[in-house]
Amino acid sequence: MEFKHVSVLLNEVIEELKIKEDGIYVDCTLGGAGHSSEILKRLSQKGRLIGIDQDTDALKAASEKLKDYNNVTYVHNNFYNIKNILEDLNIEKVDGILMDLGVSSYQLDKPERGFSYMHDAPLDMRMNKDSKFSAFDVVNNYDEQKLYKVIKDYGEEKFAKRIAGFIVEKRKEGDIKSTLELVDVIKSAIPARFRREGPHPAKRTFQAIRIEVNKELEILNKTIEDGINKLNVSGRMCIITFHSLEDRIVKNKFKELKDPCTCPKDMPICVCGKKPEIEIITRKPIEPSEEEVNDNPRSRSAKLRVAEKII
């Protein structure tokens, strides 16, 4: 199956990165290389792109798509390690960093990856296939309280308590091994009238488990901090999120880096000595146009936030 991922907010990202032809840019979520291919078109041979992805399928597909470029470095790793990755490459500073936090169409649509509630597959959901920890472990080994917290916090699912209870009860019959087994449990936990309206009844729970498996939210704060520290002055960080939990973390971290002062608000002067590191370029997030949403419905919830390094 072709590695397919329609790059969301492509033109907006390219515009906001303010690409310099001799700059160094990091695509933290290389995926199908849609954003990266457009960055490379704007770089001279003196410019450089670092493409990071924890999915080996993505790296393979990207290297094929970008085979005509010799100024790309491919890194199989989690962007959480961006600081170490750049240091290992002897790169002190970069001019732009992109994070597209969406799951690729390839991952969603390839049944055996176990991301989708529409296909029957083993419970997996690992973005990094070398990882030993999968959705199976969350569903079958977490106790009821821990399951409830994951589903409630990461899925914002109002029936989280019932779903966690039903999962634990079903496990008494044996392990829950497949995606559709889990879907059946979730459906049985949600009252019928609520199943008939809104999104697929398993959507929020599957999102929550995927986030837990891949530690998607836990790593964001540190990654943003480390990335900003690696930017040259006037370098930019662009982050595309796809749900409110991610967007809130990005928004709050940008605010903290713009106004890091810890002094009491009523103090006449700052004594903590902490200086703003960034300027927030997007007071409100950039969202897809109606035309883009029509062309790619999965872009509907995307939000782009941009920050620029100032010191």
Image (cartoon, rainbow, N blue to C red):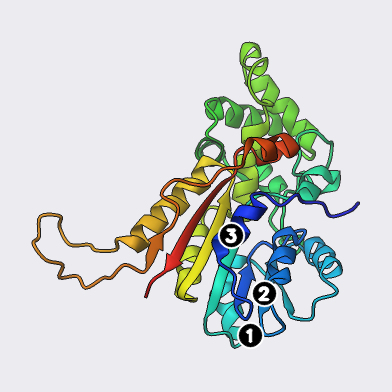
At 38% from the left edge and 62% from the top edge, which residue is drawn? 279
| Mark 1 neighbour density, 10 Å: few (under 14) some (14–19) many (20 or more) | few
Residue matched to label 3: 15
* Between 265 and 191, the one nearer to me in the picture: 265
* Between 292 and 220, the one nearer to me in the picture: 292
Q: Are marks 1 and 2 in contact (CB under 8 Å)?
A: yes
Q: Are marks 1 and 3 in contact (CB under 8 Å)?
A: no
Res. 191 image quadrant: top right
Query: Residue type at mark 2?
Result: Ile
Callout 3 secondary element: helix
| Mark 3 neighbour density, 10 Å: few (under 14) some (14–19) many (20 or more) | few
Residue matched to label 2: 50
Residue matched to label 1: 89
Query: Residue type at mark 1?
Result: Leu
At 56% from the left edge and 43% from the top edge, which residue is drawn? 287
Q: Is residue 117 visible?
A: yes
Callout 1 secondary element: loop
At 64% from the left edge and 35% from the top edge, which residue is drawn? 290
Nearer the observer, disc 1 or disc 3?
Answer: 3
CA–CA distance in space, label 1 to label 3: 27 Å
| Residue 275 drawn at (x, y percent) | 28, 70
Q: Quadrant of the C terminus?
A: bottom left
